[in-house]
Image: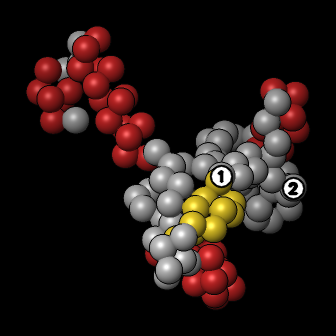
Amino acid sequence: IALQEAQGGLNEVQAQEFVEQALETFRWHNQATVSAEEYRQLHDQHRLIADVVAFKGPHINHLTPRTLDIDRVQQAMPGRGITPKAVIEGPPRRRRAILLRQTSFKALEESVDFVEHDGHAVAGHH
């Protein structure tokens, strides 16, 4: 980022390297840091806490669109092969939108190997 700011942009090689590093930063790590039972216990308390504790590094599994017409985006996603969340989060539609309403596509289901205390892996999903 500092290089881009200093140069006023990136050349093609630098841009490709930037994208590769960003993808590596956010790639999915399929080996959990906890056992399947520990993950279940954490998940029963709070989904986000379970994910932070159980998985290495950040990853992106859904995105929230930025738009002025969230109802239109929600309606258009299936036509583009994207499965949206079941409902738009936030208050109902109003003539004058003053509160945040948001949606996203459904999170992808990803394979996970939970490593048990005896060292063997238990296949699961997230």
Q: Amino acid at mark 2?
A: Ala
Q: Amino acid at mark 1?
A: Glu
Provide the residue designation for mark 2: 86
Q: Is residue 3 left or right of residue 66?
A: left
Name which quarter of the figure residue 56 lies in. Answer: bottom left
Q: Is residue 58 left or right of residue 89?
A: left
| Mark pair 2, 1: CA separation | 20 Å
Q: Tag 2, which secondary structure?
A: loop
In this view of the protein, which residue sits in the foreground, 88 or 126?
Answer: 126
Rendered image: mark on residue 110: 1
Q: Residue at x 28, y 25 (%)?
A: 17
Q: Residue at x 44, y 56 (%)?
A: 58
Q: Residues within 10 Å of mark 2 (few under 14, many from 20)?
A: few
Q: Position of residue 124 (x, y in %)?
A: 68, 63
Name which quarter of the figure residue 122 lies in. Answer: bottom right
Name which quarter of the figure residue 91 lies in. Answer: bottom right
Q: Is residue 55 left or right of residue 1?
A: right
- Give the total number of marks visible in the rendering: 2
Quadrant into which the C terminus falls: bottom right
Which is more N-terminal, label 1 or label 2?
2
In this view of the protein, which residue sits in the foreground, 57 or 10?
Answer: 57
Residue 110: tell me if it is visible. yes
